[in-house]
Image: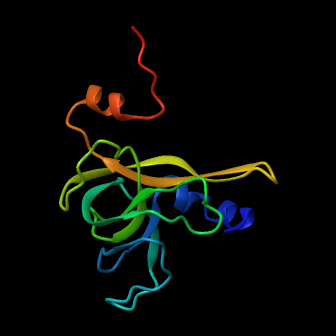
Amino acid sequence: MQLPRYHRLRQTFYRLEGSRCTNCERAFFPPRKLCPDCRSTNLETYLFAGSGTLYSYSQMTQSPRGFANVGPYAVGMVRLDEGPLIMAQLTDVEGVELRIGMPVEMVTRKIQEDSAHGYIVYGYKFRPLFSNTTEALLLSPDVVATT
């Protein structure tokens, strides 16, 4: 994906922004212009809470073009608490036993880096929802323990 497309979709990628039908209250991600249930065009911007459950997952051992420095990594289908099922990369899962039905939360992380042009693209990923903050900090690759 090219930088102009990421820039255009930054609200969707950074904030998990979708749409919601004002007639039937159904939420969609990514945003839609037409509700497939009631055929209404009265949809409003909707900001998802970013929490859900892991519906399915897979371990990717070969990265797609443009993401060679990322693999291996886990991807999952996440059922958001508001209803939509979305696919996303899973992060902070090293040493964690993934299981279907486990609670997850959205975090903003680096998705892609193009050193030739100097841009870094951030977006949403999901991580296991830890019951205790210390456990989450110890498993985060961005945190350095000090004594």
- Residue 34: image location, x then y, percent: 46, 86
For the N terminus, the image quarter is bottom right
Say how many tags the image has.
0
For the C terminus, the image quarter is top left
Task: Give left or right: position of 144 versus 93.
Answer: right
Q: Nearer the viewer, residue 8 or 88?
A: 88
Figure quadrant of residue 83: bottom left
Task: Give left or right: position of 74 versus 81.
Answer: right
Extreme residue toward the top, this view: 147
State whether residue 43 is above or below residue 14: below
Extreme residue toward the front, this view: 61
- Residue 123: image location, x then y, percent: 54, 54
State whether residue 37 is above or below residue 10: below
Residue 72 visible in this rendered orientation of the protein: yes
Q: Nearer the viewer, residue 91 or 84?
A: 91
Q: Nearer the viewer, residue 41 or 32?
A: 32
Looking at the picture, the colour scheme in use is: rainbow
**Residue displayed at 54% across by 59% down:** 13
- Residue 111: image location, x then y, percent: 57, 54
**Residue displayed at 30% across by 74% down:** 25
**Residue displayed at 44% across by 80% down:** 42
State whether residue 20 is above or below residue 103: below
- Residue 141: image location, x then y, percent: 45, 35
**Residue displayed at 35% across by 48% down:** 127
Extreme residue toward the bottom, this view: 39
Residue 47 visible in this rendered orientation of the protein: no
